[in-house]
Amino acid sequence: WVDDARLVVLNARSAAAHGAAIQTHTRFVSARREGGEWAAALNGERGSRTVRASAIVNAAGPWVRQVLDEALKIKLPATVRLVKGSHIVVPRIHEERHAFILQNPDRRVIFMIPYERQFTLVGTTDVPVTRDDYRAKISRNEIDYLCEAASRYAEKPITPGMVVWSYSGVRPLYDDGSENPSAVTRDYHLLLDTGAEPNGAPVLSVFGGKITTYRKLAEQAMEKLSGRFPGKPGWTHTEPLPGGNLEGRSFRGLLLDYRRRHPHLPKVWLTRVLRRHGALAEEIIGDAREERELGSNFGGGLYEHELEYLVRNEWAHEAEDVLWRRTKCGLHMTTAEKTRVRAWLAEKA
């Protein structure tokens, strides 16, 4: 499986390292063509402002059509189908490290994947939703569906009461006319609009796509915009994401190296922090030789050094950013421990 939230953050870090200005908590209000460029109105923590751009990439996911209709006032023939997918997390079902693909009677498949050492991830669902439902949340019917699907194969029944966490997302699928949401194409479509002028300021809209093809999608998007950015060939196929340059070592080699250099730091924590940050874990561990040198222990494998790092380098603002997006420490923490994290962020973030 892929931790989609960390994948997004690491792509943002990579972009920032190449000169991009990353602006979280900022709303794209509108944009208009002016003198061969875009003048885009933004609203965020720094207030309202207008920025100029050579091109716009509308990669708004479930909001791709809304951006076209309301912010850009552009009519394109393509439409998007919104299909919700939900997962549940339950205590570890099997001890083996491998995942299972389960065939369901409705001809769909369900995945059962080891998750965060102590848990099993079960998913996913296919539920059509409307634009008003984009703040996706799992329903009781989906929980029952996933529990029943897993129970057909598990030694012991999986019940809704065993669910310790769940999450949902909305897939913005290109509408190919299929009636069955599971049959709607997962391929992506890139639509370019240059307005009334042949060389007008372009906007490229992304319909569909999957996390497994995101880099190829981005590469093809840049190819379509190459007229605006000449002489810039693709390079992402040769450059690892931040923290991914292990200098020829495997992950196990990296882990053994850190255990040798930091024999008094918790082994389980070292494994987790290296899986989250790779070679960048060095910025968190620093010269720490003992656990107390990692700063306050918030529980669940989260120490103050990492919390400071997430605020400083990964745009973490609130507790959910830390507990469920940049990490999954929330799975391992008590309510009181989560409250401490919220209080720390309210004071220092």
Image (spheres, rainbow, N blue to C red):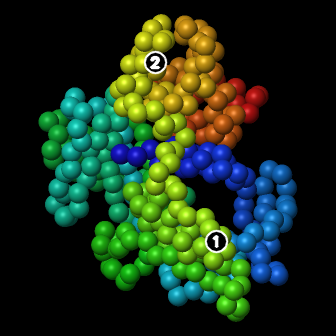
Instruction: Estimate the x, y position of residue 88 in percent, counting from the top left.
Output: 36, 44
For numbered disc 1, what is the local secondary structure? loop
The disc labelled 2 sits on which kind of residue? Tyr
Query: Separation of disc 1 and disc 2 at Cα?
Result: 43 Å
Query: Could you say which is closer to the camera, residue 191 or residue 257?
Result: 257
Residue at point 43% right, 15% down? 259
Residue at point 48% right, 7% down? 264
C-beta proximity under 8 Å, tags 1 and 2: no
Examine the rendered structure and indicate whether residue 297 appears above or below residue 65: above
Residue at point 27% right, 49% down? 111
Instruction: Estimate the x, y position of residue 324 in percent, counting from the top left.
Output: 52, 39
Residue at point 66% right, 79% down? 202
Q: Which residue is mark 2?
A: 258
Q: In what quadrant of the picture does the C terminus appear?
A: top right
Q: Which residue is mark 1?
A: 230
Query: Could you say which is closer to the camera, residue 68 or residue 103?
Result: 68
The disc labelled 1 sits on which kind of residue? Pro
Instruction: Estimate the x, y position of residue 216 in percent, counting from the top left.
Output: 45, 63
Query: Could you say which is closer to the camera, residue 124 or residue 52?
Result: 52
- N-terminal of the pair, mark 1 or mark 2, is 1
Examine the rendered structure and indicate whether residue 265 appears above or below residue 271: above
Residue density around tag 1, few if under 14, some if 14–19, many if 20 or more, within 10 Å: few
